[in-house]
Amino acid sequence: MNVMRLLKALPALAVAWAGVEVHAATITVFAAASLTDGLGEIARNYQNKTGDRIEFNFAASSLLARQIEEGAPADIFFSADEAKMDALEKKGLVEKKTRRSRLSNSLVIVVAADSPFSIKSPKDLTGEKIGHIALADPQSVPAGIYAREYLNKIHLWDEIAPKVVPMGNVRAALAAVESGDAEAGIVYKTDAAISKKARIAFAVPRQDGPEISYPMAVMKEARDPKAARAFLEYLDSDAAGRVFAKFGFILENHAP
Amino acid sequence: MNLLLQNISLPLADFTLEIDAQLQCQVTGIFGPSGAGKTSLLDLIAGLRQPASARIALNDRVLTDTAAGVVMPPRLREIGYVPQDLALFPHLSVRQNLLYGHRNGRETGPLFGFEHVTEVLQLQPLTARGTGDLSGGERQRVALARALLSSPRLLLLDEPLASLEAGLKAKIIPYLRRVRDEFQLPILYVTHDEQEVLALCDEVLEMQRGRMTGRRRINARNP
Amino acid sequence: MTANEWQVVGFTAWVAALSTLVILPPGLAVAWLLARHDWPGKSLVETLVTLPLVMPPVATGLILLKVLGRRGALGGFFHDRLHLDIVFTWRAVLAALGVMSFPLLVRSAQWALEQVNPRFEQIARTLGAGDLRVFFTITLPLALRGIIGGVILAFARALGEFGATIMVAGYIPGKTATLSLSIYQSVQLGEDATAYRFLGVSVALAFAAVWASGWFMRRQRR
């Protein structure tokens, strides 16, 4: 008898299921590694609100940009620096009207939580005891490029460069410091905030640090541009802004 | 010599090798069809295979005693072995093959000198050659000389003439006789050829399917 | 090819050669143990030795990272007692290449040793030779061509190693940048011309190595 009831309910279930399929979109977001936790929470909120599914690809912005160039299916690109977005725009891959930047960040020097090293200023990085300094790859990854920019500005780059261990992305740099294999590293303040095994030794003052900016945009080849634009609007909203601020990102004032 | 083969038991593919005998003649033939277990018996005596049970002693030296847990490794047994396929080391020259076991002399030095053995077996012109260049008969003599030069107390020959044709066999037999007479070594001679038994042995054990089926003395030695 | 690019090729060849040399004695020893005898635990050892061949290289690299890092079992000892770092240095590259090519060396050498007719070893024993002498004067020379084939194969594998290397040594230009790591880096940076030059060298090296290895294997006596 139960089987009969189930069989009778099947057509209704099928329609309902199909209905859900029709209305809910899946949006693929390629985002910088440093946005992992913030975007994760924002996406969960959005999913609960609208039923749309957000799928993420978190990696170094340089790697993501390369993947998009090669045809990877990204609906939204959320980069950690303007240069990567500019490169994609030049190739005609960006929906220019949707592009905007509202997030910034700041740099910190981190050491392992139980580290005996005290770094009171960046100059301490040149000390003998510091053998390895973990950065995101300063040749390509935004976090590394920002760090090099800063070190160049305070004339320490040449001295520090031989100790630099270039990592694939900023979270990998953080992990290298957490594991103890690098005595120090330079990452975003937001990365240090979520880490239990690393602590901030020195926070780069905003006026000394480089201009950090996180542009986001819908890609021209987005599979569901309407849904993608809707999510982008949400990312620009106050609700999302509160979450970003919670994780330590700096909100730029600009007109949406 | 005195070779004790007591309570030997070795399971083989189709049957179990079971031998119990005491050998005291200088040249003892082991005669039987192929597959009778003759080579396995030689392997046991040389220590290359382990029996399920056995007590093997040569001139009061215990080589294997499974009951007492004694198994002497092959390199200490001082038993020269010429296998059926000769096993000449292909990567060494004739001379290097011959001298391989030569350091294995007893405390007083090797029993048989290099010049002596090569002269008896007429190997002098061959020593510089590689083993690949030798004829069947030459290979046979080199394998024999190699075993002799390791100062053995007992020589095991496994079908030494089996792979040679009749004319060549007739040529090698005098060498074997010279070895027998010149070096006075006890020899165990495995063969399935009655002629060889008559030509060389003092006594012969007959084997079939792993068992001794007969034993007889050969009346007189052929000169 | 620029001077920097040749440096990468040279560094890769040097570390690969060194790692092959380092794994040769233990590799031969393990191959010999696995070739001839049966002993309790043999299947376990055989499986462990083959693991790096079958596991994802990055997984092996992760294990190496944990063991060779400053807080790891081995790395800790090196760092605290010998004041030597392994992770993020050429030593990590050496370790990664060695571990990843070890199974190839062992399997090839094992096969070569198994081709040697045991009769030769037995007769050598009756002539008075002990285990070591038998190994060095009979077994090894007769298995030599096959072993050389295996050494070349291991060297080729070391040349091409990527997954474990990136985990445990990272890409540090001038210090740990191997050929395969450099290909990956050039592609990431969009430097296609560089990537293709490195690709050409990789293919040429691999081709030559496999060809030479096969040449030796075919000449292994049976």
Image: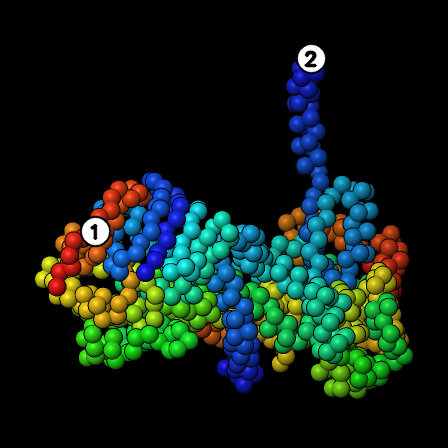
Q: Amino acid at mark 2?
A: Met
* Circle 1 crowding by C-alpha within 10 Å: few under 14, some 14–19, many from 20: few
**In the displayed structure, would residue B16 be above or below residue C65?**
above
Query: In this rendering, does residue B166 appear at all?
Result: yes
**In the displayed structure, would residue A190 be above or below residue B130?**
above
Q: Residue C91 or C159: which is nearer the viewer? A: C91
In the rendered structure, the answer to whether residue C194 lies left or right of residue A230 reads left
Q: Position of residue C119 (x, y in %)?
A: 35, 60
Residue appearing at x 15%, y 66% in the figure: B174
Residue closest to the far top: A1
Q: Quadrant of residue C15?
A: bottom right
Q: Position of residue A137 (x, y in %)?
A: 69, 72
- Mark nearest the camera among 1 and 2 is 1
Q: Quadrant of residue A150?
A: bottom right
Q: Position of residue C219 (x, y in %)?
A: 33, 67
Query: In this rendering, does residue B130 appear at all?
Result: no
Label of residue A188 in the image: none
**In the displayed structure, would residue B171 be above or below residue C1?**
above
Say which chain tag 1 marks.
B
Q: Amino acid at mark 1?
A: Arg
Q: Residue B18 or A8: which is nearer the viewer? A: B18
Say which chain tag 2 marks.
A
Task: Work out how far the residue at label 1 is from the one at label 2, CA to CA, in angstroms.
Answer: 97 Å
Q: Position of residue A62 (x, y in %)?
A: 67, 67
**In the displayed structure, would residue C209 be above or below residue C117?**
below
Residue appearing at x 45%, y 61% in the figure: B73
Q: Residue A43 or B86: which is nearer the viewer? A: B86
Residue under label 2: A1
Instruction: Point out the image quarter for the C terminus of chain C.
Output: bottom left
Label of residue B217 in the image: 1
* Circle 2 crowding by C-alpha within 10 Å: few under 14, some 14–19, many from 20: few
